Amino acid sequence: MERKKIAIVGTGLIGGSLAIRLHEKKLSSRLIGVDADPDHARKALELELVDEILTLDEAINSAEVIILAIPVDAMVSLLPGLLDKIDNQIVIDLGSTKSQLADAVKAHPKRGRYVATHPMWGTEYSGPAAAVHGAYDNKAVIICNAEESDDDALEWVKHMYRKIGMHLLEMEAHAHDLHAAYVSHISHITSFALANTVLQKEKEENAIFELASAGFESTVRLAKSNPAMWVPIFLQNRENVLDVLNEHIEQLKRFRDSIQNGKESELKGLIEEANKIRRIIR
Amino acid sequence: MERKKIAIVGTGLIGGSLAIRLHEKKLSSRLIGVDADPDHARKALELELVDEILTLDEAINSAEVIILAIPVDAMVSLLPGLLDKIDNQIVIDLGSTKSQLADAVKAHPKRGRYVATHPMWGTEYSGPAAAVHGAYDNKAVIICNAEESDDDALEWVKHMYRKIGMHLLEMEAHAHDLHAAYVSHISHITSFALANTVLQKEKEENAIFELASAGFESTVRLAKSNPAMWVPIFLQNRENVLDVLNEHIEQLKRFRDSIQNGKESELKGLIEEANKIRRIIR
């Protein structure tokens, strides 16, 4: 397919890394950056993530494809008005929650031009300087409510994701949010809470620094993640997140009770149960 | 210093990886393996982790240095009797808890020949086949109650750890166990409990497999760890582990309450607090 003029709204980690990849894979004839934060816009241009910076309205008029890579609360505010303004452009979002957004535009006359997606890639860093080469490769992308998108829009979006190395899954938006709570959102909460636990208990920060093993770093890594991204995710996906978080607290209490009561075989059973994750994660 | 004849008791991940490193760094003239599990012993020999397999008594008679790399409950049972049998050999343990062991041999007439250590290295795998090259390099090792060890034994152990690339820290055994609960033991519990949470909630295992991002894998990685190693660690370090685990449950409840009540700025504050871990973990 021929290259397209693509606008990236939000030139941080997610949008910036995608911009690099769109260029690498010859999907874009020109990359336009849009960013509410002038420092991010300047940085994205300086790093050559994008070819030029425009305002959102300029970008809508100039681009054939508009990709939204902004926090999910901003997404819900922005998308309906953006669809009001477009003609035949393709609009894609990369957000981590899907239900509220899907519901917000369900009845919009331009709904067909929009494709709801969630590429399962990210790091704990944020901003244009955090953008990396080779992102998204070999990861899954979920396309939600695909039947609500126009065929040509859907076809191009699938082409784009395949070309950057992702494997496609389709899912209904509410099912997506449920699974995302289980395999992504809860991990971030446990990591944030673990960091707070250790910072609370271990007053000798030097001891953490000196003693932290690779295991500790791996479990606490996500605690560096950006609140501007994660607060709206947890709040938009409130019901599912609370459900899995309550289960997690119950599971921790089972460990606590078996340790407290010195129940060796019960504790062994809990760990053997956890070991079953080996079946799933190599 | 001249190379020594070294016996490794327990030829799994920890002992096996150390055996490789002792050979790589020309610290051993001969490596003797001892293992209660005949399959492990055979495998360790087959993989050439060690030069020969002997019984514990044969190894005691034959070696100049005896290194214990077995679960911490077996360590407490074994060490006093082993010290009864030695002459002038150096005995080292690599266990993750230190108080019970230190207390068990405090008054032993051969206490001076023993050096209590905890090298802060490991992976989530176990057994001789999990042993890797280059282990321990650039990590911390804690030597506990160093003043109870003979000078010559302590000097050789420090020499060994420096030569395999570790940086040395000294700590009293009870202080060690407190810090280890904070920076290592709690991470394992959160990871085990997270695996159990997700396995409990997400009945579509295929969804975990398909959707799991690098973030999920990183937080759940430690859940593959071996119960034979971890059950005795949690039970020996019961008080400290319960203390930090209770704090962790409280921290999770703070996340739960702020999500439940839609308290955006409170949730943001919790995440910003967690972000401070960036100061410590790069």
Image: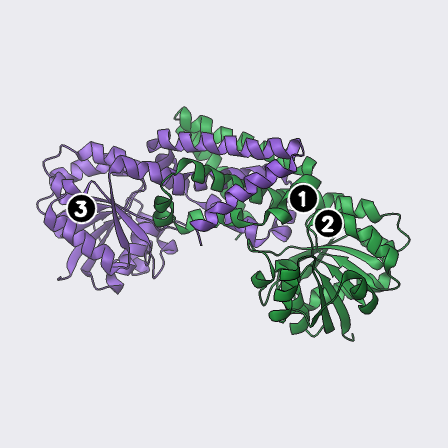
Chain colours: A green, B purple
Report which residue position mark 3 lands on. Answer: B91
Name the subunit of mark 1.
A
Name the subunit of mark 3.
B
Above/below status of A106 relative to A15 = above
Tag 2 near tag 1, CB within 8 Å: yes
Identified by mark 2, the residue type is Ala
Above/below status of B19 relative to A219 = below
Residue B196 pos. (x, y %): 54, 38
Identified by mark 3, the residue type is Val
Residue B126 pos. (x, y %): 39, 49
Report which residue position mark 1 lands on. Answer: A232
Q: Is residue B196 left or right of residue B85?
A: right
Pointer 1 local density, CA inside 10 Å: few below 14, some 14–19, many at least 20: many
Tag 3 near tag 1, CB within 8 Å: no
Q: Note whether residue B204 is visible.
A: no
Name the subunit of mark 2.
A
| Number of the front mark, 3 or 1 | 1
Between B264 and A190, which is closer to the camera in this rendering?
Answer: B264
Q: Is residue B101 left or right of residue A167?
A: left
Quadrant of the image for the N terminus of chain A?
Answer: bottom right
Disc sitting over residue A74 in the figure: 2
Residue B217 pos. (x, y %): 54, 50
Query: Rounded to the nearest whole Å, what is the CA distance between mark 3 and mark 1?
Result: 55 Å
Say yes or no: labels 3 and 1 on the same chain. no
Identified by mark 1, the residue type is Pro
